[in-house]
Image (cartoon, coloured by chain):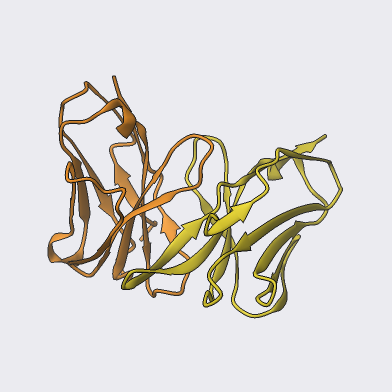
Amino acid sequence: QKEVEQNSGPLSVPEGAIASLNCTYSDRGSQSFFWYRQYSGKSPELIMSIYSNGDKEDGRFTAQLNKASQYVSLLIRDSQPSDSATYLCAVIISSGSARQLTFGSGTQLTVLP
Amino acid sequence: DTGVSQDPRHKITKRGQNVTFRCDPISEHNRLYWYRQTLGQGPEFLTYFQNEAQLEKSRLLSDRFSAERPKGSFSTLEIQRTEQGDSAMYLCASSHGQNYGYTFGSGTRLTVV
């Protein structure tokens, strides 16, 4: 089992719709969760962080966390073509003596005009 | 400070040659990370420094790879005797705490021919 799993997609939604991206993780002790956006050929950009169960909203983005189910999601409301990118779920996971950010393989989102 | 800087942006090298990449983190961040990303995958952790101490190395980091962070400022990642399988995007990131999101540089894209 991978430490962080995402649906690889691709996911296509029409402009103005809600895009829903999902992620599960294996380490029950994880406390820090992030969503990164990565445009083709560019580096990952942090768009959301969440540390507590429930929802966290930032503009058109809402991150949802359920630690009991080991599940994180990202909702993008009023999707725009500029949201077309790969979205990476990342979790701080203990590995050896350290804790570092572990990524899923990403979900490719295309917003159709 | 404008963020994490990486140099060069692109590197093409012949198989068997040595290459060195540089990363300048955000000055207030004491933690520095190296990741590798191949097409269609999320970034994979390679190694991490807290100040000048290298505290964790992934098993992905073969003995051909070495990283340094002299004086706890910039870092270098050297790959000796490059192989075609080393072709990837090498990403540097920094953070100011172990549970915070990482800020990534633009990456160095390595192509081994």
Image quadrant containing the C terminus of chain A? top right
Q: Nearer the viewer, residue B58 or B88?
A: B58
Left or right of A32, for residue A56 = right
Measuring from the top left, give residue B87's x and y in whole percent: 34, 31
The outermost residue toward the bottom is A52
Q: Is residue B91 above or below residue B83?
A: below
Residue at 49% across, 40% down:
A42
Q: Is residue A29 above or below residue A83?
A: below
Left or right of B63, for residue B33 = right
Measuring from the top left, give residue B68's x and y in whole percent: 16, 56
Left or right of B16, for residue A21 = right
Residue at 31% across, 73% down:
A97
Measuring from the top left, give residue A46's x and y in whole percent: 54, 58
Chain in orange, by letter, is B
Give the drawing colour for chain A: yellow
Q: Nearer the viewer, residue B85 or B29?
A: B85
